[in-house]
Amino acid sequence: MSKAWHAQRLGWEIKRLRWRLGTFGLLGVVLLLFSVAMTLFEAVPLARDLHVRSQDLERRAREATVPPSPAPATIEDNGYSPSFTTFLHSLFAMANKEGIATSQVAYKAETEGDGKVERYFVALSMKASYPQLRMFSADLRTLGGMRLEHVTISRGDIGQTTLDVRVELSFAIERPA
């Protein structure tokens, strides 16, 4: 059997298939072939990419560490509580770990009650992306004695990925009697 005969036979089978299926059946076959092609060329590579990204995310989560607290020799006695200094050090270590640039920091101290509790209010301005901000806020949850008071997020242009963030938080310390 020659190639010409096979080509003729294939043409005849296609005509017969069109006659048997009709217009809607042929449209269904075309849609079925299109969906198979989309699955092979779009969904499968996307699933592979998602798998690779999830493995990378799990690896990065395993490597993430809590920022170290400073050694006692690095804490200077300048009238402020060492635990507030440790808190500030941890706060900036968390921001640096996520690659966040802090542009301005202000704080004030208030004494509550009979002087046994000191509350420090800290306001910091920074520039960060959405993923950096999410990781930083997750890290903030590990700090004890801290309360997040207010967060302001703004973006100059809808196309920008960098956010201007202002975070206001308070830190309470109980003084020994």
Image (tube, rainbow, N blue to C red):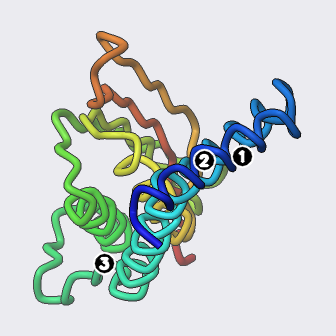
**Where does the image place residue 128, in percent across and percent down from the top left?**
28, 40
Q: Quadrant of residue 75?
A: bottom left
Residue 45 at what x, y percent from top left?
A: 44, 62
Q: Is residue 100 above or below residue 6?
A: above
The location of residue 166, given as percent across then percent down, is: 38, 30
- Of 70 and 140, nearer the camera is 140
Amino acid identity at mark 3: Pro
Marking on residue 112: 2
Which residue is outermost to the top? Answer: 157
Distance, label 3 to label 1, CA atoms, is 54 Å
Tell me which numbered mark, 2 or 1, is placed earlier along the sequence.
Answer: 1
Q: Is residue 61 or residue 51 the one in the foreground? A: 51
Q: Is residue 38 left or right of residue 98?
A: right
Instruction: Classify mark 1: helix, strand or loop.
Output: helix
- Give the camera-side residue of 11 and 113: 11
As drawn, 153 above or below 15: above
**Residue at which label 3 appears:** 67
Judging by the rendered image, the residue that carries numbered circle 1 is: 32
